């Protein structure tokens, strides 16, 4: 009888130990799922912030006026340049310009090497323009600068969350103004938006105008924005403005810079 009782106690103890083991496994799986869900939620928040910032960036830069067909170019958006440096550029009128300075020349100086000095109320920002990689973009920027298009214009947007850019180039300061024309994307293959990158803002493929942005910290943007310059000096000026923050007019970490940045003039030199 004692042997039977001992065997029952042993079997009961084994069942109890198995039950404890199953409970421990369930708790471990629950912790793993909780950690995964928490990580996914964080990733979703980060991705959402980047997506929102990108949407704002992509939504800027296009005038609201009705598009007009160019007599010397097709009415549809131009295709991206097949090879660089480009020997010919197409600029399509889109309606009323924030400042009407006409159209850039269709034959760029593709052999030139350009440097731009953006003189702001905060100090000068020096940029080497990538003429051999984004010829038509540089051609437009040089044209606008020489026409004083950028003079006395505010940098209307600063982002400090998700992506890290200062956006300029709209004389109206609203984010909707443009030069009255648009042109094709360039230099997108393998584009990365590291600190010091200068690229075009747009409202979709091949809708470049006058608005551009200066990257002051590495930003996880898709390769959808034509890279046409690299900051040589003055990056610290933008970083200081970014440190002061934004008014969050477009959402947290996205709006007008609290420390106002005004482009006084843009000077172009051949190097």
Image (cartoon, grey):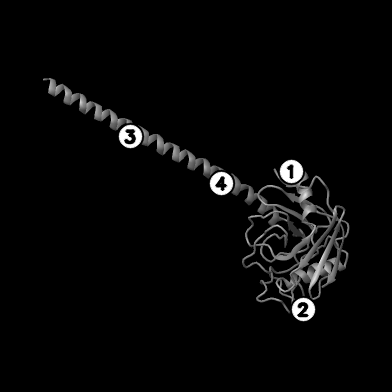
Circles 1 and 2 in contact, beta carbons < 8 Å: no
Q: Position of residue 211 (x, y in %)?
A: 77, 60
Q: Position of residue 36 (x, y in %)?
A: 48, 43
The span from disc 3 to disc 1 (Cα, nearest Å) is 51 Å
Circles 2 and 3 in contact, beta carbons < 8 Å: no
In primary-sequence order, the first of circles 3 and 1 is 3
Query: Does residue 66 appear anywhere in the picture?
Result: no
Q: Nearer the viewer, residue 260 or 2?
A: 2
Label 4 residue SS: helix
Label 3 residue SS: helix
Nearest to viewer (mark 4 / mark 3): 3
> Which residue is the site of mark 1?
248
Label 2 residue SS: loop
Nearest to viewer (mark 1 / mark 2): 2
In primary-sequence order, the first of circles 2 and 3 is 3
> Which residue is the site of mark 3?
22
The span from disc 1 to disc 2 (Cα, nearest Å) is 43 Å
Q: Position of residue 196 (x, y in %)?
A: 73, 59
In primary-sequence order, the first of circles 1 and 4 is 4
Q: Nearer the viewer, residue 215 or 252?
A: 215
Q: Position of residue 195 (x, y in %)?
A: 70, 57
In primary-sequence order, the first of circles 4 and 2 is 4
In primary-sequence order, the first of circles 4 and 3 is 3
Left or right placement of residue 10 versus residue 263 in this view: left
């Amino acid at each position: 009888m004692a042997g039977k009782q001992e065997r029952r106690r042993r079997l009961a103890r084994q069942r109890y130990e198995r039950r404890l083991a199953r409970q421990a496994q369930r708790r471990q799986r629950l912790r793993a799922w909780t950690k995964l869900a928490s990580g996914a939620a964080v990733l979703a928040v980060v991705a959402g912030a980047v997506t929102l910032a990108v949407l704002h960036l992509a939504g800027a830069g296009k005038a609201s006026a009705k598009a007009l067909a160019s007599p010397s170019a097709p009415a549809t958006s131009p295709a991206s340049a097949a090879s660089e440096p480009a020997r010919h550029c197409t600029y399509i009128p889109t309606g009323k310009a924030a400042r009407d300075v006409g159209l850039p020349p269709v034959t760029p100086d593709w052999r030139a090497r350009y440097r731009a000095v953006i003189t702001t109320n905060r100090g000068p920002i020096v940029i080497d323009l990538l003429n051999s990689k984004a010829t038509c973009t540089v051609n437009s920027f040089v044209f606008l600068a020489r026409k004083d298009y950028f003079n006395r214009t505010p940098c209307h947007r600063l982002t400090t969350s998700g992506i890290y850019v200062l956006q300029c180039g709209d004389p109206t300061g609203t984010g909707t103004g443009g030069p009255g024309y648009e042109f094709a994307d360039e230099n997108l293959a393998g584009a990365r938006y590291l600190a010091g990158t200068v690229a075009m803002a747009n409202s979709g493929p091949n809708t470049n105008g006058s608005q551009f942005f200066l990257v002051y910290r590495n930003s996880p943007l898709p390769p959808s924005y034509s890279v046409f310059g690299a900051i040589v000096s003055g990056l610290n000026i933008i970083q200081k403005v970014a440190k002061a923050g934004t008014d969050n007019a477009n959402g947290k970490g996205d709006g007008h810079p609290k420390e106002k940045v005004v482009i006084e003039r843009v000077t172009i030199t051949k190097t």
